[in-house]
Image (tube, helix red, strand yellow):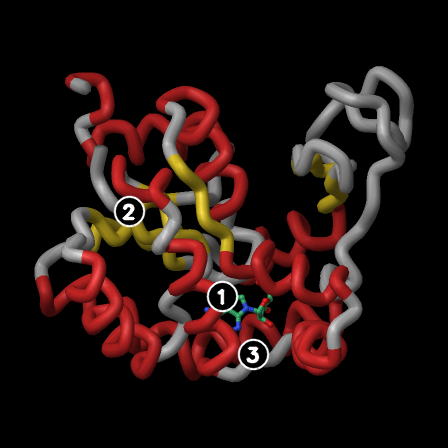
């Protein structure tokens, strides 16, 4: 299976599309945001530092991200291909990822840019809740719940991410414009970039992604 990178503004659906690919094709999903949240939950001094940056909507230090990502990519389940969600988020990370890929003898097959307007992304952010137990992500405005406030799959209490508020969203969006947009141009020049409209709904976005990566032929 291919190695895929998702690049997008906050709340464009990177996590949702990765989960859909994982569920349908049994692909490995690596979310750098989740790796960082895991570090925060560990309560380590590094985790405290990471929490502060995430809550401000700023990027976490590259060195911390590289270590977490290297450790994850070295696990053998990635040998069959992986989906990388939320990395690279700046040009330095894109350059270092070339080195990491060489070390691992793996290449990037598809870079998929999920395109969405700021206003739609903002709506998604303010409604987003997720299950701390099974990781399923919902939107309070668009999804229906068997019991309000509980996960449809495992009945755990749904939670809101601490960085899913209007103020942090605005900062995250600014960070995306200044730091991450140059990465899109970088992959465009390399000829591996694919643009997907992510503003309609998750099923439409998924169909476009399946077409790009030729999933139906696997
Ligand atoms: P996400 O879960 O992808 O929305 O990321 C949540 C937050 O984690 C971001 O706003 C950043 O603070 C941090 N983060 C995620 N990926 C990276 C990365 N590649 N480099 C630096 N910080 C990151």
How many tags in the picture?
3
User: Which residue is at 24% across, 77% downward?
Assistant: 95
Q: Disc 2 versus disc 3: distance between alpha carbons?
A: 22 Å
Where residue 185 sits in the image (x, y, percent)? 22, 71
Where residue 59 sits in the image (x, y, percent)? 55, 78
Q: Which residue is mark 1?
A: 68
SS at circle 2: strand
Question: Are dots 2 and 3 in contact, CB under 8 Å?
Answer: no
Residue 54 position (above or below residue 106): below
SS at circle 1: helix
Question: Are dots 1 and 3 in contact, CB under 8 Å?
Answer: no
The residue lying toward the viewer, choosing from 151 and 123, is 151
Q: Disc 2 versus disc 1: distance between alpha carbons?
A: 18 Å
Q: Which residue is mark 3?
A: 60
Residue 62 position (above or below residue 135): below
Q: Quadrant of the N terminus?
A: top left
Q: Which residue is mark 2?
A: 4
Where residue 211 sits in the image (x, y, percent)? 22, 29
Q: Earlier in the sequence, mark 1 or mark 3?
A: 3
User: Is residue 115 shown to the viewer in this render?
Assistant: no
Crowding at dot 3, Cα within 10 Å, few <14 / some 14-19 / many 20+, comes out as some
User: Which residue is at 49% across, 66% downward?
Assistant: 68
């Amino acid at each position: 299976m291919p190695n895929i990178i998702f690049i997008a503004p906050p709340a464009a659906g990177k996590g949702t599309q990765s989960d859909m690919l994982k569920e349908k094709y049994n692909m490995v999903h690596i979310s750098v945001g989740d790796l960082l949240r895991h570090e925060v939950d560990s309560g380590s001094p590094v985790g405290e530092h990471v929490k502060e940056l995430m809550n401000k909507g700023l990027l976490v230090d590259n060195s911390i991200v590289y270590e977490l990502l290297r450790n994850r990519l070295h696990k053998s389940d990635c040998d069959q291909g992986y989906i990388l969600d939320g990395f690279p988020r700046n040009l330095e990370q894109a350059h270092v990822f070339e080195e990491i890929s060489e070390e691992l003898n793996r290449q990037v097959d598809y870079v998929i840019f999920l395109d969405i307007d700021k206003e739609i992304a903002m709506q998604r952010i303010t409604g987003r809740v997720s299950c701390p137990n099974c990781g399923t992500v919902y939107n309070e405005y668009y999804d229906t719940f068997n019991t309000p406030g509980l996960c449809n799959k495992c009945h755990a209490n749904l939670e809101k991410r601490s960085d899913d508020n209007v103020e942090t969203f605005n900062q995250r969006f600014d960070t995306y414009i200044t730091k991450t947009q140059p990465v899109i141009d970088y992959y465009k020049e390399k000829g591996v970039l694919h643009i997907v409209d992510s503003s309609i709904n998750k099923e439409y976005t998924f169909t476009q992604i399946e077409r790009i990566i030729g999933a139906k032929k696997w």
